[in-house]
Every structure is written in C-alpha cells, then in structure tokens.
Image (spheres, helix red, strand yellow):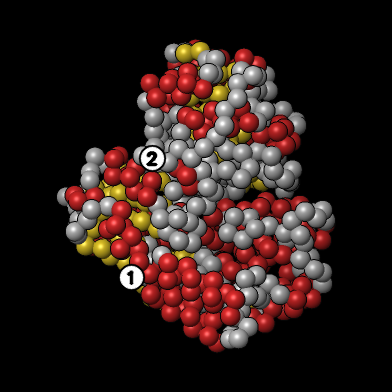
Amino acid sequence: MAKVLGISAYFHDSSACIVVDGEVIAAACEERFTRKKHDASFPENAIRFCLEQADLKSEDLDVVVFHEKPFTKFERILDTLLKKTPGSFRPFTRALDGWIREKFWIEDTYRRHFPFEGKFQYCQHHVSHASAAAYSSTFSEAAYVVIDGVGEKACTSIGRFENGKIIPEIEQRFPHSIGLLYSAFTQYCGFKVNSGEYKLMGLAPYGKPKYTEIIKERIVKQFEDGSIELALDHFGFLDDLKMINKRFEEAMGRPARRAEDEMTEFYKDVAASIQKVTEELVLGVLEAAHQKTGKKALVYGGGVALNCVINAEILRKTSFEEVYIHSASGDSGCAFGAALWAAGLIEESILGKQKHEYLGQGFTEDQMKSALESIGIAFKEMNDQQLFSDVSEQLKSGGVVGWFQGRMEFGPRALGNRSILANPSIEDMKRTLNLKIKKREGFRPFAPVVLDEYFEGYFQDEGNDYSRMLNVTRIKEGVISIPSCVHEDNSARVQKLEKDFNPKLYQLMEEFHKKSGIPVLINTSFNERGEPMVNSPEDAIHCFLNTEMDVLVLGNFVAYKSENTNVKFEAKSYAMD
C-alpha cells in the first residue's frame, strides 16, 4: 500500500496532496491556512494537514515528490537572462537570490521540517498537470494537452495517456507561450499577472473583438502544427520584471491601463479581442493533438485550462469526442498531479479511485460551536429540516448567506462547501454581492448552481461537464427569472448539481425551489476581495462580520447579522500548530 506525498511551492499557489493505495486522501493549498492569497511558500501547514488526514507520520511515507525539476527550470532562467545581458541584470539578481535561498534546496527543506528517510522524487511540471487530469478522469486512454505560462522549459505539451502512464510526445518551449500572451494582456488591461487573468476573461463579454487582426498581425501567429510564435521584441518578460514594453503598447495604439484608471470601452474591446485570439490558439493546439495522437478522448490541464469560455468550445470546435479537465488545473493542482504520477509508477492501476472534490480540511460540530461561542456570536442550532426551511426563506427574501459545510473544496472553485449563496432572481443582487460582499469590480459575473433535473429548462446543454464550473453555457432564450447570474453575453459558468455530489446543498436548493419556484442559486466563493477562500470557522466568522452578509451557516448553526452588529473580531492566520 504505497503512501505518496506530493508538494508544490515557490511560484504561486503552493499546495500538498497525499495519496494512499492509489487514492487521494487529502489535498489543500497553503493559502487556506496562512490566509495569504496565492501563497508561494513551502507548504508546511498543508503538508501537516494531509498527514493528519491520512493518519500518517512523515516517516511512514514511501515517496515524497516535488511538482517540477528545479535545476532544469533554473537552467532555462539562466540561459534566458544571460542572452539578454546586461539589460537583464536586475531580474537576474532577483532570480538568483530566490534560487540560492530556497528553490534549489526543496528536498533539504522538506527533510528539515519533517523526519523522512525515504525516496524524494521530482516530477516534470507539465507531467504534473497532465497527471492531475489523466488519473482523476475515467478514461483508460486519451490524448493529453497542457497549456500554461511556462513549466521548466515547456509552455505547451502534447502526449498520450495509455496503460496508466503519461507518455510525452512534443512540446513548445519558452518563450513562445499562450499563457504568457494572455498574462501580458492581463497586465495591459490593468490587472495583476497570475491572479487577474479571470478578470480579463470576465471583462471580455463587455467588449467587441475589434483588435484580433492587430494582435495576429503584430504580436502572435500560429502555424499548422499548432505551435505559435510571439513577436518577442514586444514583450518585457525576457529582460525585465514586466510582461510588456513600449512596442507592445505602440502596437495596440494606447498605453497600458493603470489599475486605478477608469475601465474604458477600449480595454473592454482589447479583452474581447485577446479572448477570441486565445480561443483560436488553444483550439489550434488541441486539434493538432488530436491529429498527432488519434485519440477520441482528451485530458487537458495547465493554467489556461481554467479559461471556462474556451473550454466550452472544445467539443464543438475540435475532433475530440470527450474531454476531462480537473477542477484544480492550474498550479494549485500540481501537488495533486505529482502525487498521482508517483503513485502511478508504483501501483499497477490507480484509475477510478479519485471520488470527489472535497479534499480539504473539515471541522466537527463541536469545533464550529466553540468558535462561535469564543468570539461571542449569537446563533441558533437547528436540525436539517429547520435549517433548510429557515435558510431558504432568508434566500428568498434577498438575504446573502455564507454557507460553510464539510470538507473544503480543493481548487479555485467554490462547489458548495465554502460558498456564498444568494437569490439570482433579484435584479440588483449582482451589484449587492460585488460592492457589499466581495468588494470588487462591478463587471465581475457570478456563477449559478442549478438542480440537475432542471438544467435544461434554464441552460443550453452542449454536452460538456457542468458539475465543477469549468465550462460556460448560454441561458435559454426566454429565461428572465435569474438575471443576477447571467453575464453580459447571456452566458453563465454554471454548476449542474447532482444529489450525490453535495447532498446538503442539494436539499437546501430543493427547499428554496419549493418556496420560490426557482431551482437556481448564485454560488460564489466564500471570501472577500484580497483573501483566499475561507477554511476554518474563524475565517468564515471574520468574513461574515467584515462584510454586509446577512446570514452565516456553520454546519447546522445559524447566525444572523442583525443579532451580531456589535461583535468585533480581528482576523489572523490560523496555520496549524
């Protein structure tokens, strides 16, 4: 019974995952414990949680595996910077400092924090991404594609998944990267790289793709084999700490937007344009992968696979008949993939053993009650029937509910255990959530969750997997009852909820449907701007008190803002002891 720990660190979204006998027992991002969004540090707290959840000590592990090969990555960085010297001196010294202090020594760091005499392995970055998708899919064989910013050297990878093994075939190497192209436009439109790409995607429907030809003529071109070529003299990431330079701005006709500047129609149109160009590039790679491998099924990973607008087009616009994308397809899922890759080298078969998305930390009723009492929160304890009736009534009346249940989701999407829920039929609910709860840009959309048997009454079914918010679809013509979860282009990143996936949320929604006639709720992640999704009861209480949220539900305990207006609570890190 092999026991494998996977870890990722030192870029963004550090995480840990433990696999026992081929099954993922636990996985979590470090940010959820330290409360530092996209925390890149060594994931000590996530590792301790995973070991505790598996009831193991570090000494019990057979293998510890890191999600990439540091020396290969450093070789690429060094080669790039030396080619650009002397202009690259500043980024070179910054990069060198980080590598000397920590990145070369991940094995030593692990053994210093945790007693371990076993084998320490390194998995190639893109193989980690591919493994996360392949081993958690139901496919016995498939093509795999990974598209992201850059791993060690690869930016796009194509290969096969056969006989339980990842078999790399071809790759496109740095600096010609679809992910970096999208990140460059993320910065150009005034958002932060590595965290603002989803904002760019959300902004795109507000604009028109007026600049696609300029982008394809002056900034990027694609060849028949799916590979791309960036006009490198328009980018700054080779010899500077910025993604773009003056030539990029000149090509687009205006300077980059500053974060504090007004969002004008021009930048909305730019967002629409790069979204369309990126779709064409990604679909070109995927079709090339189909031609190369001849497989009917696709497993797809990397940060670009979080672009749910593009994902929705894969089955319609490529030759693949089936596609699977893991919900943590970005770097937060690399520890997950690396652990499964290492387990796959040991076990005869690990397919079909990955059962659910709720792999994070959970809390007992006593722990939740103790947190409420220690902070001085007034609350009521209810049985399930009372809970569903009361909370659904609150939602019907326009209340915003923080919903905290069971084990935390792994990955960036709230799937009903760490969610903020609201009534989508209320016209200004989107504005209320953006301004008073999430404290973010008003253009940002909210995702609906719908009871599975009512999906086709509200949304167009294009054959995609809608269970984990990885695809958008269109609202059916004539549906006007859920305006606050419909985006500018009548699309929605919908979660189609089956009862077995999340029984408690399902029962709440059934009761809401009885009271309101609507089998749909807004479901957004339980956090406010600048913070990770809540992990602990204390995190949830802080978010409840620090926003204009109306109701907090921790398990079967219910607290109302109207009864807790004078309670003060200073948040802090709840990293595990």
Determine the residue positioned at 54% across, 28% down.
541
- Which residue is drawn at the image coordinates 82% and 72% (left, top)? 253
Residue position marked by numbered label 2 in the rendering: 576
Q: Position of residue 462 (x, y in %)?
A: 56, 49
- Extreme residue toward the left, this view: 1
- The numbered dot on residue 444 is none
- Tell me how far mark 2 sits from mark 1, CA to CA: 38 Å
Q: Can residue 33 be seen in the rendering of this structure?
A: yes
Residue 348 percent location from the top left of the image: 19, 58
**Image coords of residue 28 (percent x, y):** 41, 46
Q: Secondary structure at mark 1?
A: strand
Residue ID for mark 1 = 167
**Can you say whether 419 is above or below 366 in the image?**
below
Q: Look at 54% across and 81% down and name the residue there.
A: 81
Q: Nearer the viewer, residue 75 or 287?
A: 75
Query: Residue 241: x percent and y percent?
Result: 62, 71
To which quarter of the image does residue 229 belong?
A: bottom right
Q: Is residue 546 above or below residue 179?
A: above
Q: Is residue 480 visible?
A: no
**Quarter of the rendering containing residue 389:** top right
> Which of the two marks, 2 or 1, is nearer to us in this view?
2
Mark 2 element type: loop
User: Against 29, is 127 above or below?
Assistant: below
Residue at 24 percent of width and 50 percent of height: 58
Image quarter (top left, top right, bottom left or bottom right) of the C terminus: top left
Mark 2 residue type: Met
Q: Which sits earlier in the primary sequence, circle 2 or circle 1? A: 1
Between 202 and 246, the one lying in front of the other is: 246
**In-image side of 188 versus 70 (left or right):** right
